[in-house]
Amino acid sequence: MLNLIPLPAFDDNYIWLWHDEQHAVAIDPGDPAPLIAYLDAHQLSLEAILITHHHRDHTGGNLALRQRYACAIYAPVNPRIPATTHTLHHGDVVELAHPPLRFDVIATPGHTLDHLSYVGHGCLFCGDTVFGCGGGKLFEGTPDIMAASLDTLLALPDATRVCCAHEYTLANIDFALTIDGDNPALLERAAADRATRARGEPTLPSTLALEKATNPFLRFHHPDMIAFARQALHCADPAPAEVYGCIRATKDAWDATRP
């Protein structure tokens, strides 16, 4: 049996962990301490690490974990990612024997230019490309680049479980309500996810269907978001990347007003 666990790390990160009661694979273990504690408590052997991008809160555990477990580390081509043993490109496949897992590698630049996502077993590990009801900031990419990456993810099956790297969902919902507050699916999600967090539970994984229905960063083709961008940009016919860029700029300005 394969088990998928979101391990909290730092203030709001998740380290995603697959295991089969003996062997484990971790995605983006920025902090090795909670991962080591879980592995030790459950007597698991860490066989591999998958890295989505070079930011320290995703890669900070690589050296310690590689030294402790001699695990393989799969990552984008970037010298800033420590201890990489296998470099990956768009279209590659990661296939592991223990635990028995197979992931398709998808390039999803935008948050960073090296960003990869991993798809397998009905799950999308999207790092900082998509969050619950939100999306990653453009530290290195452009709206056009990110919109193309999101179009790739939008083509995945609706039932895909979306495994993001941060618990940002409630704040993202608060923002989404400011630009899409008449969306009944978003209003329903707001109530459900607030109740989930009140119980101390993660809001993730979500599903791609839920994100398509409620996440403004994945709704840049939707008439409601096009209408929002048309008014904000004073543009009669904004292109999809312009709609996405308008949503991103509005969220960045909203973030700047928060304590």
Image (tube, grey):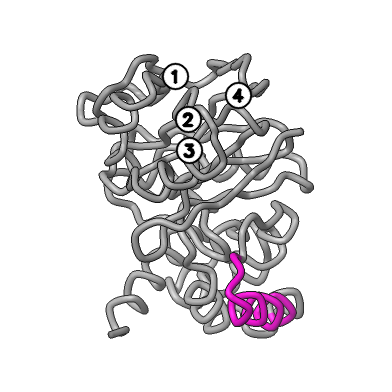
Residue underneath mark 4: 104
**Above or below: residue 194 compared with residue 203:** below
Residue 239 is labelled as: none
Q: At numbered mark 3, what does the secondary structure look like: helix, strand or loop?
A: strand
Q: Residues within 10 Å of mark 4 (few under 14, many from 20)?
A: some
Lower sequence index among marks 2 and 3: 3
> Which quadrant of the structure image shows residue 156?
top right
Lower sequence index among marks 4 and 3: 3
Q: CA distance from mark 1 to mark 3?
A: 17 Å
Q: At numbered mark 4, what does the secondary structure look like: helix, strand or loop?
A: strand
Q: Position of residue 30 (x, y in %)?
A: 34, 45
Q: Residues within 10 Å of mark 3 (few under 14, many from 20)?
A: many
Quadrant the C terminus occupies: bottom left
Q: Is residue 63 visible?
A: yes
Residue that appears at 66% across and 33% down: 21
Answer left or right for 157 relative to 202. right
Residue underneath mark 3: 27
Residue underneath mark 2: 107
Residue underneath mark 1: 89
Q: CA distance from mark 4 to mark 3?
A: 14 Å
